[in-house]
Amino acid sequence: MTKTDKKHFFSRLFSGIPVLGWLLGVLIAVLLERYLGEALAEILGLPKIPVLFGFVIMLKKPALIPGSLAFVILIYILPIWIIARLSAPATNAAAGFLVRRSVGLSAMIHLALLYACIHIWSDISAYRVLALKLTLISIMLTLSLNVVNGYMGEFSCSHPGFMALGAYVCSIFTVGPFINDRFFDQAILPLFLAPYIFPVALIFGGLAAAAGALFVAIPSFRTRGDYLAIISLAFMFIVKSLIENLEFVGGPRGLGGQPDLASLPTVFIWTVLCVWIINNFVRSTLGKAMNAVRDDELAAAAMTVNTRNTKMTAFLFAAFWAGVAGGLFAHVLRYVNPGTFGVQNLAEVLAMVYFGGLNSVYGSIVGAVSLNLLGEALRPLELFKWIIIPLLLILVMIFRPKGLVAFKEFDPRRVLQPKLKSE
Amino acid sequence: MSLLQVEKMTHYFGGLKAVYNYNLQIDPGQIKGLIGPNGAGKSTIFNLITGIYKPTEGDIRLEGKSIVGYKPHQVAAMGLGRTFQNMQLWRHMTVLEHVKMARYSKLRYGLCGAFFGTAKRRREEAESDEKAHYFLNMFGVDPLADQNIFNLPYGAQRRVEMARAMATEPKVLFLDEPTAGMNPEELGRMVATIRQVHEELGLAIFLIEHRLRVVMELCESIQTLVFGEIIAEGTPEEIRSNPKVIDAYLGKDVVE
């Protein structure tokens, strides 16, 4: 077998399977894990179901490596591939039918399947639920930062600041009226109303972040260059020390006791909403105006593009979603303190953007998911985690300077349509 | 009334007198040329009229309405389309996206449409697609619509840039050295295209050019600019025989 033949062979194994087929495979795999996982783990000599594809367990107890590998292969890899491969003709037909009927309907069904997968997967442990929620929030943050740093080509450092504004403002709206709290006194509304107020609270959080963004944008968008980076960095510190000194939100001790509103479906829906709206925006001519401004502002203006408006809109829009993500973050952890929204948070979200790829919705999702997963998987290495992850980042920057999947348009129709077998 | 009128426009960069007492009148359907040695201020005049710089003195009127003090994008939307001397294209965008971008001011769907993908947006984007293909066709680059702009050969890039300028549906088209850096074949095609656009649409064109042959062939009236001042204005024949122009171009006391 020559090299090209080999390549051909491998690509044949995976080609011709639509997203629907993969989702079906994953669904079956997570169901298998749920019902047979315990038994299989016992047979393989594992103490319990490996919580994160065996990464954690393998790093902690090297003796269990063969068992965990076997578990991953038997529960995930083989079932997913077999189901996806065997069902390909059926799922291709179904995907084709759905896309012809309506892209919206097809997207809904795919998302429902995806949600079912992650729900069943995460049902096994509370740790998985938490990791998943934080990953989804990271996707929102990364994508919104990508709007400024990727699509618009500016360098903004204030995302933790926007996130903090969103987290605190949103918390005030939920802790204030619904919880007996030392700062906000007695609850004035019954707790069962809280889920209805929560979306409004999140939007207020987003708007507060956008208002903060206006404060940064006005002085920094008169010209281009490094000004935004400096002003936004300053903004981040201002927000942090402001919150540290505001006694009614707890100062440096933080604000806790948020009602348990950010359930997995809630976070999932908001993430989907965020991805959908941002993707809509960046694919419209109004959104592409950001690219025009980034690549040549003078030409953009000469082609009737209102450059200042474009920059302001993009920046405020990105800040809004960072605020919403912050609000969700506060309700996932049910406690926030200003220390969370510092330079380390900034470094993480910047890393996700540049690792995943600039100017790309795919890239942001890939970046956020992979760095979150990596962070969790390498947790047993403790300090060495902070050597391996930056090393990986450096390697990506050397071999793919724009990130893993940069400059790729996310077209839902194309993603959902049936895949033809490559010849 | 003339379409575009510039009166006594003067501009200083600090203490440097870049343009002095410049007058221009373009009638509907007229092709006017502007020639002059390097550094004479030709591009500055373009930038002044299209709103990139604000003239120190003087007035610019488009169809009788003063456009001094408007931002470049507003001036462009009012009907002054332009190309650039060194083709300012957008690195990461396709040919089609370039031309669609020039329809920006004509889109009415607003942010709501952009965020939620409304029916209005789909309709307007489809309309804009259609227009873009029309202009790409006009310049013979429609088959390249889905290519990234930097995959195109130089001549094709120039044509896309012109298609982009045309997509703003200008009343006057400003061309800044449209044949710069072209080989004789590309040059011939470009001249033919400019003439064709002019004849089909009756468009008024204002042209900066270095190559006298091109200007002589295309323009009804030519201005010669030296050190920010017009030294001669007239038909190609008058310009060709004007001793001051010969002086400036042959370089007796002006180094080109």
Image (tube, coloured by chain):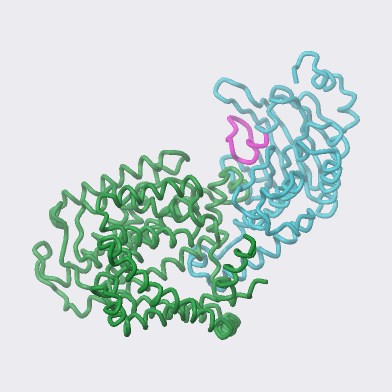
- The front one of A183 and A362 is A362
Tell me, by letter, which chain the rendering colours green: A
When the figure is inspected, residue B95 is found, relative to residue A132, above or below; the finding is above
The cyan-coloured chain is labelled B
Look at 32% across and 67% down and name the residue there.
A54
B21 or A392, nearer to the observer = A392
- Residue B133, percent from left and from top: 72, 61
Q: Is residue B57 magenta?
A: yes
Q: Tell me, yes or no, whether the highlighted magenta stretch contains residue A288.
A: no
Q: Which residues are magenta?
A: B45-59
State the image coordinates of residue B182 (x, y, percent, origin top left): 79, 38
Question: Which sits in the foreground, B164 or A157?
Answer: A157
Q: Nearer the viewer, residue B233 or B119?
A: B119
**Residue A268 against residue A284 in the figure, above or below:** below
Q: In the picture provided, is B178 more to the left or to the right than A18? A: right
Within the image, what quadrant is residue B55 found in? top right
Compared to residue B18, the image places residue A254 above or below, namely below
Q: Which quadrant is the N terminus of chain B positioned in?
A: top right
Quarter of the rendering occupied by the C terminus of chain B: top right
Task: Report whether B152 appears left or right of A366.
Answer: right
A222 to the left or right of A385 = right
Whether A87 is drawn above or below A62: the answer is: below
Q: Residue at x 28, y 74 (%)?
A: A263
Q: What residue sits 70% from the left and 58% below the top?
A: B145
